[in-house]
Image (spheres, helix red, strand yellow):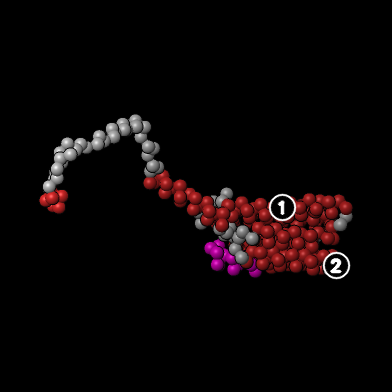
């Protein structure tokens, strides 16, 4: 062993030769497969916008219910009530109200479609489908029960039945519409109870007055506050 002088030890001046560097690890070759490119920014933005729009449609309200259309339905109901009061048979009375119902459905459908186009609201949106699917079943039940009760000779209960089932349909569909619509449905249901508990002449008057007054009384505020 080579002697080491004290100065070299003290001042660290002893420089030893022969030290070697360790060999570095050889670099790995780059893979020929490149990572997939991220989706374009505009594509991600469109996906996010579509998701937000779908979510808002599901959570939104069906505001295309036409107030002026309801007013027109009320006027047609008043005309039907006057015409039905002039009939001399229950068959003719029933025919008048069936024609009035078909006309009212046509007026409502046209008014809703017109308002939806003006507001650029698709009629196949989430709230619209929910409104239709909730409104339709009580109306279909009412049509079937009308036929059954007419054949059985129980036409005296039809005014109360129509009012209650129509009110049920309005409440069910109104759950996806503006808040005043279910209130109107509740008024129809209460009127139906009155019609069922009163004699036939009074139930006919209740039927005509309810369809005329409620549609006009609720249609005007809806038209003014919700764009027609």
The residue at the point 85 percent across, 67 percent down is 199
Magenta stretch in the rendered image:
217-228
Circle 1 SS class: helix
Residue 152, can we see it?
yes
The residue at the point 63 percent across, 55 percent down is 131
Q: Is residue 226 magenta?
A: yes
- Report how far apart the C-alphas of labels 1 and 2 lie in the structure: 28 Å
Residue 113, can we see it?
no
The residue at the point 64 percent across, 64 percent down is 181
* Label 1 crowd bin: few (<14), some (14–19), many (20+), radius 10 Å: some
* Label 2 crowd bin: few (<14), some (14–19), many (20+), radius 10 Å: few
Q: Position of residue 178 (x, y in %)?
A: 59, 63
- The residue at which mark 1 appears reads as 137
| Of 97 and 52, the residue lying toward us | 52
- The residue at which mark 2 appears reads as 199
Left or right placement of residue 87 versus residue 226 in this view:
right
Quarter holding residue 205 = bottom right
């Amino acid at each position: 062993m080579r002697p080491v002088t004290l100065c070299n030890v003290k001042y660290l001046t002893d420089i030893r030769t022969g030290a070697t560097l360790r060999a570095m690890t050889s670099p790995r070759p780059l893979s020929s497969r490149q990572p997939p490119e991220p989706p374009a920014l505009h594509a991600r933005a469109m996906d996010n916008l579509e998701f937000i729009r779908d979510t808002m449609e599901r959570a939104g309200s069906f505001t295309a219910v036409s107030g002026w259309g309801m007013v027109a339905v009320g006027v047609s109901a008043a005309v039907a009530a006057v015409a039905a009061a002039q009939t001399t048979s229950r068959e003719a009375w029933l025919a008048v109200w069936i024609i009035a119902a078909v006309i009212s459905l046509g007026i409502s459908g046209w008014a809703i479609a017109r308002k939806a186009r003006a507001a650029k609201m698709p009629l196949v949106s989430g709230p619209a489908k929910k409104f239709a699917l909730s409104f339709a079943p009580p109306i279909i039940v009412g049509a079937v029960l009308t036929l059954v009760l007419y054949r059985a000779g129980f036409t005296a209960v039809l005014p109360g039945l129509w009012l209650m089932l129509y009110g049920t349909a309005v409440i069910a569909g109104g759950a996806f519409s503006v808040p005043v619509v279910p209130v109107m449905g509740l008024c129809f249901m209460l009127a139906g109870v009155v019609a069922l508990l009163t004699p036939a002449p009074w139930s006919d008057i209740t039927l005509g007055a309810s369809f005329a007054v409620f549609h006009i009384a609720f249609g005007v505020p809806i038209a003014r506050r919700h764009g027609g």
